[in-house]
Amino acid sequence: AGCTFNDIVDRKIDAQVARTGSRPIPSGQVSVVGALVFMVVLGLIGLLVLLQFDSFTILLGLASLGTVVIYPFLKRFTNWPQIGLGISFSWGALVGWSAIFGAVEPPAIILYVGCIFWVIGYDTIYALQDKEDDTLAGVRSTARLFGPHAKRLIAVSFACAAVLFAVAFFLAEADIAAFVGLGLAAIHMVWQVTTLDTEDPERCLKIFRSNRDFGWILFAGLVVDAALTGR
């Protein structure tokens, strides 16, 4: 639903960028009204899920709507829209913890901040594809802001994410399997940075997409940890 809202707001900008001009709304495959209906349906499905939890978690989930609404406009006014995306996309770290424990506690907050750094890293890689078109369209991003230092600053973002994930795991009393998973995921991050070519859009897209593998590795370590420890 949030991605649909983003595409509705950005439809005119997307039409000016070669890679995004073929998206459903700017290409005319889907009307704005049709996209709005789709967004509302998805939002209602999400609400049905959210209403299964306690009142605090419901309010916390609803609060995420504010971050979703604000995000698409950030690229027009700030060089750091990736932070806004991280704040929005990572909200599940808070809601997931609250759904189980009924509150937001330090491990969840640290995990949340770590996820924001992860998003900054991988979405900067994503934005590297469109540097030239974004400049012409007046779209701001960390890819444009970082310039020739992009690779180094992506590495810093990933390093911060990995350290914060480790702290969150420690505070949550995770066992060895979770840290092994994190270690393997961190190696994946190193591979991303070392093989990244900031001037090759196809390579940037491939590495951006590989972050789903990073997520699966991290998740697998946590699942194995839970299975072995019974927690």
Image (cartoon, rainbow, N blue to C red):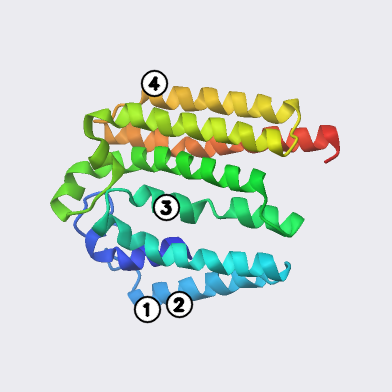
**Amino acid at circle 1:** Val
Badge 3 element? helix
Residue at position x 17%, y 43% from top? 132
Q: Quick check: can you spot residue 195?
A: yes
Whole-percent x and y of residue 34? 40, 76
Q: CA distance from mark 1 to mark 2?
A: 6 Å
Quarter of the image where one finds residue 22: bottom left
Label 4 vs label 3, nearer the camera:
3
CA gap, disc 1 and disc 3: 24 Å
Name the amino acid type tagged 4.
Answer: Thr
Q: Residue furthest front?
A: 106
Quadrant of the drawing holding the C terminus: top right
| Element marked by disc 2 | helix
Q: Earlier in the sequence, mark 2 or mark 4?
A: 2
Q: Which residue is mark 2?
A: 37
Residue at the disc numbered 3: 85
Whether 62 is drawn above or below 135: the answer is: below
The three-letter code of the residue at mark 3 reads: Leu
Q: Which labelled disc corresponds to residue 33? A: 1
Residue sitting farthest toward the left: 136
Quarter of the figure with residue 182: top right
Depth check: give the residue in front, 23 or 109.
109
| Whether label 4 touches label 3, CB < 8 Å | no
Q: Is residue 62 left or right of residue 157?
A: right
Structural distance between the alpha carbons of marks 4 and 1: 44 Å
Residue 77 percent coordinates (x, y): 25, 58
**Closer to the camera in the image, 27 or 204:** 204
What is the secondary structure assignment of the residue under circle 1?
helix
- What is the spatial separation of the Cα atoms under label 3 and label 2, in whole angstroms? 23 Å
- The residue at which mark 4 appears reads as 194
Residue type at mark 2?
Answer: Val
